[in-house]
């Protein structure tokens, strides 16, 4: 990043040896070693050709630096750099003890290209790098920040209103400290940012050579926290109802067992059993979500007859009160050999058929057909369908097509299971206007059969 001078009173003006030192720092930030002789002007547009747009305007306001053709770039060893405390590519540095010529911007990366805010101060605490991301977050002009003390350029406070630099004291504190972990801090005006710092020293207990500070917005973390809060609230709500029922019926039976007839006892125990199954199913869903999110969902592949699996689920639904005429099953044979996890396939079919019965209307059609990539299964109902604007959110957490119960986690899990098999799933509108879910499972086999 090319750095210019600042003529404003706020930035201050260095003279004498200090001015030469600042010029060396700025030359290092520009990726150019300081020259021993008189400086010759840089060619128009710099080493990278003419500048345009915002970069041209920014470059025009900066003082030209001596130009030298870039030499070969040394390879960056991340492991060695981590052990030695050296900065990685893209971190601009100023000269320190033993660095009369300064250091180059490794890898040719401009700090303005970094997604996070980057602020670097030298051994005297003055800012030598203030990239565009930091400027956007702090609403500070980089030209005013360069050359000022870091506590003035970046006035941070903790959540209790205390000055962060006074608390941490990076230049006067313990010499054994290596940095500050990421934490929430406040900018002027109360805007919250995530800040972490790295203390670069000449040796483990030596004086501070550079202070590297990164800034990051809190929006992504807030979204994650809201998602976790929604999951906890949903789980608490879904668990409370069946557990209250189980507790109430069992307490009643224990206290007044002799007063109930056998039919009444059976009804209460059947209700307890159904609610216990509901709790078990919810816990299984939460475990599946955890495995999907962490990439640890295991698929135990076995030969699966998908047509037989569909018939078994339809039979279970009719046994629970649905009329056989409501289901239309079409299996186009011969089908390619399908190696999949039978339990996971049952989970996919169970979720899709239950959704079609609960939220759809009319006939539920299940089609199983061969596909160029494997086997395709389509589940269609004749209800009102899914609004066009909601189709992009169907497979997200907590999406519910209606207020007819459910946790809103089923389709999220279905998508995760299908993708764990290497397949795809999509939602659309069926011929009768209802919802249509179609998933494709690829032809596959266990590793020991393909080697």
Image: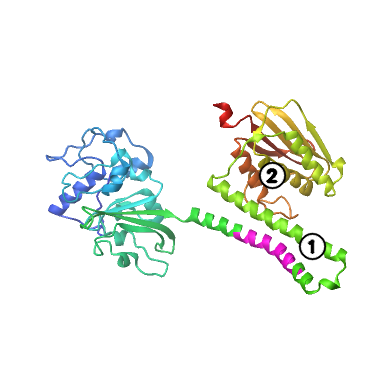
Q: Is residue 396 visible?
A: yes
Q: How many neighbours does mark 1 have within 10 angstroms: few (below 14), some (14-19), or many (20 or more)?
A: some
**Can you identify the residue that label 1 sits on?**
269
Return the residue nearer the eye: 151 or 55: 151
Q: Examine the residues drawn in magenta and state their main secondary structure.
A: helix
Return the residue nearer the eye: 135 or 451: 451
Read off the magenta span: 232-248
Return the residue nearer the eye: 334 or 58: 334
Tell me the quarter of the picture where residue 442 sits: top right
Label 2, label 1: how far apart the Cα atoms are: 26 Å
**Residue 156: percent from left, percent from top:** 36, 63
Q: How many neighbours does mark 2 have within 10 angstroms: few (below 14), some (14-19), or many (20 or more)?
A: some
Q: Is residue 184 left or right of residue 268?
A: left
Q: Is residue 86 visible?
A: no
Q: Is residue 339 left or right of residue 433?
A: left
Q: Secondary structure at mark 1?
A: helix
Return the residue nearer the eye: 309 or 115: 309
- Residue at the location (19% across, 47% down)? 24
**Can you identify the residue that label 2 sits on?**
347
């Amino acid at each position: 990043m090319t750095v210019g001078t600042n003529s404003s009173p706020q930035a201050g003006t260095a003279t004498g040896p200090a001015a030469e030192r600042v010029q060396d720092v700025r030359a290092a930030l520009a990726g150019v070693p300081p020259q021993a002789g008189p400086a010759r002007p840089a060619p128009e547009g710099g080493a990278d050709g003419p500048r345009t747009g915002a970069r041209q305007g920014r470059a025009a306001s900066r003082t030209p630096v001596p130009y030298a053709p870039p030499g070969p770039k040394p390879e960056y060893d991340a492991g060695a750099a981590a052990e030695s405390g050296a900065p990685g590519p893209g971190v601009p540095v100023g000269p320190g003890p033993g660095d009369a010529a300064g250091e180059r911007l490794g890898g040719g990366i401009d700090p303005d290209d970094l997604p996070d805010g980057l602020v670097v101060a030298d051994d005297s605490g003055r800012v030598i790098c203030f990239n565009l991301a930091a400027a956007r977050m702090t609403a500070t002009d980089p030209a005013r920040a360069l050359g000022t003390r870091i506590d003035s350029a970046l006035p941070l406070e903790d959540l209790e209103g205390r000055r962060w630099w006074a608390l941490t004291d990076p230049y006067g504190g313990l010499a054994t400290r290596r940095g500050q972990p990421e934490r929430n801090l406040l900018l002027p005006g109360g805007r919250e940012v995530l800040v972490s710092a790295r203390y670069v020293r000449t040796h483990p207990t030596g004086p501070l050579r550079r202070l590297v500070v990164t800034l990051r917005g809190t929006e992504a973390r807030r979204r994650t926290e809201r998602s976790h809060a929604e999951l906890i609230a949903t789980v608490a709500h879904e668990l409370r109802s069946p557990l209250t029922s189980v507790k109430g019926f069992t307490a009643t039976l224990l206290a007044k067992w002799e007063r109930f007839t056998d039919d009444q006892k059976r009804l209460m125990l059947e209700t307890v059993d159904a609610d216990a199954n509901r709790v078990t199913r919810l816990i299984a869903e939460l475990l599946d979500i955890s495995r999907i999110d962490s990439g640890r969902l295991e698929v135990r592949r076995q030969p699966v007859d998908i047509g037989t699996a569909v018939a078994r689920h339809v039979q279970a639904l009719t046994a629970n009160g649905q009329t056989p005429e409501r289901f239309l099953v079409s299996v186009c044979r011969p089908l390619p050999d399908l190696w999949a996890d039978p339990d996971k396939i049952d989970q996919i079919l169970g979720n899709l058929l239950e959704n079609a019965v609960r939220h759809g209307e009319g006939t539920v059609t299940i089609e199983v057909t061969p596909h160029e990539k494997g086997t395709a299964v389509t589940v269609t109902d004749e209800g009102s369908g899914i609004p066009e604007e909601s189709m992009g959110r169907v497979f997200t957490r907590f999406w519910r097509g209606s207020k007819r119960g459910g946790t809103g986690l089923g389709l999220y899990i279905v998508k995760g299971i299908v993708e764990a098999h290497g397949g795809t799933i999509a939602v659309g509108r069926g011929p009768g206007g209802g919802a249509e879910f179609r998933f494709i499972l690829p032809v596959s086999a266990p590793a020991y059969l393909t080697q």
